[in-house]
Image (tube, grey):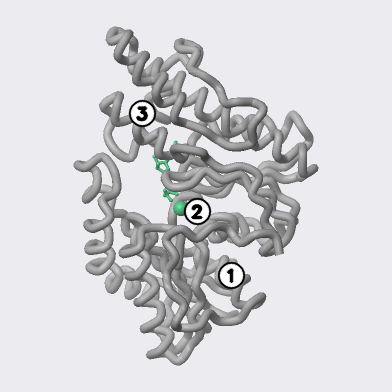
């Protein structure tokens, strides 16, 4: 078995993992900077870069130690090269290249979005395309038909806020702190999802939009200060999830995809998970919902995607840089 070291530093998690043959997770260390950013209500890029510089050494050491391997035992080292925050990406990519040079092993640059797709393979190595995949996180909302390995058709993305960003902004408005997704998810259990009829998605469009929903929540809170916060949270969550599920269902129909897959931090949402299970049961499909620790940013998914890319394209040249606005590679 060939062990690959993966590194992820695109946003506010400093993560490293050792994965055998793209599927056996030997170690996965995730150091979250959430406490550093919480007082600002979101990720501050300069603070993120500085924290990555401080954390990358200990996180790498812990990942290697937990896996019981040293540099000499690795087949390759991979890092996320985009999309993400430029300064943050640079820390992980520079560390990976340095290790590749010192160890005399290949470096593999990885697309963060492709890595979210490959997270599913860590738990389910036998997944067979075509898959209808929804990646919803603080940075991205993407609906992808995966027609084969490395063959992606993006059928919808957000035209304004990402889904997780909408959860975070509404949570801040409701005084629930950062990150807002888990707080809304918890509070919504005590609320009535039908209390406020917040606007649903534009059904004739494949793209996602959260600006209108967010504005509707702002107006509701301003006009109804007496409204129970749990009811507002539950009603917002119902509308936000409704949009995700409706568009996932339409994309799966259109592509005749028998399997539904979730990824990204919002995939930890309990209502979204339940609704996608229901959708699969109602339409004779299979739903694959990775464990939340694989949905949120981690480095095991970087190593999983790197394994496929390495076999398909070979190593990445060491003069290849970071790309903060990298998209998913087009069908090819
Ligand atoms: O994938 P991720 O860890 O990082 C990014 O790439 O952004 O996703 C983080 C996002 C945050 O916006 C957070 O509020 C959201 O995922 N999130 C959730 C839940 N857990 C995390 N949103 C809704 N419900 C949850 N349970
Ligand atoms: Zn992510």
Q: Earlier in the sequence, mark 2 or mark 3?
A: 3
Distance between the alpha carbons at the discs numbered 2 and 3 = 25 Å
Tag 3: Cα neighbours inside 10 Å, few (<14), some, or many (≥20)? many
Residue identifier under label 1:
22
Q: Earlier in the sequence, mark 3 or mark 1?
A: 1
Disc 2 secondary structure class: helix
Residue identifier under label 2:
294
Residue identifier under label 3:
170
Tag 1: Cα neighbours inside 10 Å, few (<14), some, or many (≥20)? many
Q: Nearer the viewer, mark 2 or mark 3?
A: 3
Decide which of 74, 13 is in the foreground and name it.
Answer: 13
The answer to which quarter of the image holds residue 219 is: top left
Decide which of 29, 302 is in the foreground and name it.
Answer: 302
Q: Is residue 254 visible?
A: yes
Distance between the alpha carbons at the discs numbered 3 and 1 = 37 Å
> Left or right of 40: which side holds 263?
right
Label 1 close to label 2 by CB (< 8 Å): no
Distance between the alpha carbons at the discs numbered 1 and 2 = 14 Å
Q: Earlier in the sequence, mark 1 or mark 2?
A: 1
Q: Residue at x 51, y 33 (%)?
A: 209
Percent across and percent down for residue 298 are 44, 59
Q: Residue at x 59, y 72 (%)?
A: 307
- Residue 225 sits above or below residue 29 on the image: above
The answer to which quarter of the image holds residue 221 is: top left
The answer to which quarter of the image holds residue 88 is: bottom left
């Amino acid at each position: 078995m060939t062990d690959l070291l993966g590194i992820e530093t695109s946003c506010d998690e400093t993560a490293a993992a050792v994965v055998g043959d793209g599927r056996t997770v030997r170690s996965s260390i995730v150091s979250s900077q959430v406490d550093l950013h919480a007082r600002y209500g979101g990720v501050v890029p300069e603070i993120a870069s500085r924290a990555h510089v401080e954390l990358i050494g200990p996180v790498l050491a812990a990942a290697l130690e937990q896996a019981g391997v040293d540099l000499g035992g690795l087949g390759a080292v991979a890092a996320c090269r985009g999309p993400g925050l430029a300064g943050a990406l640079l820390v992980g990519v520079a560390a990976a290249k340095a290790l590749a040079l010192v160890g005399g092993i290949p470096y593999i640059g990885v697309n963060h979005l492709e890595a979210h797709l490959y997270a599913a393979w860590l738990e389910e190595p036998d997944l067979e395309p075509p898959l209808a995949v929804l990646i919803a996180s603080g940075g991205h909302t993407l609906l992808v038909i995966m027609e084969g390995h490395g063959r992606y058709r993006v059928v919808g993305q957000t035209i304004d806020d990402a889904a997780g960003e909408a959860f975070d902004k509404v949570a801040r408005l409701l005084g629930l702190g950062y990150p807002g997704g888990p707080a809304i998810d918890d509070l919504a259990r005590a609320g009535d999802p039908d209390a406020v009829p917040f606007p649903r998605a534009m059904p004739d469009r494949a793209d996602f939009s959260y600006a209108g929903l967010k504005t509707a929540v702002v107006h509701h809170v301003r006009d109804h200060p007496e409204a129970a916060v749990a009811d507002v949270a539950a009603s917002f969550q119902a509308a936000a999830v409704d949009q995700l599920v409706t568009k996932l269902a339409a994309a799966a129909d259109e592509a005749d995809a028998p399997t539904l897959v979730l990824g990204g931090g919002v995939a930890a949402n309990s209502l979204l998970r339940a609704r996608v299970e229901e959708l699969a049961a109602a339409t004779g499909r299979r739903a694959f919902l990775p464990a939340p620790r694989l949905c949120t940013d981690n480095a095991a998914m970087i190593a999983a995607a790197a394994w496929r890319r390495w076999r398909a394209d070979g190593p990445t040249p060491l003069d290849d840089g970071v790309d903060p606005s990298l998209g998913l590679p087009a069908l090819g």
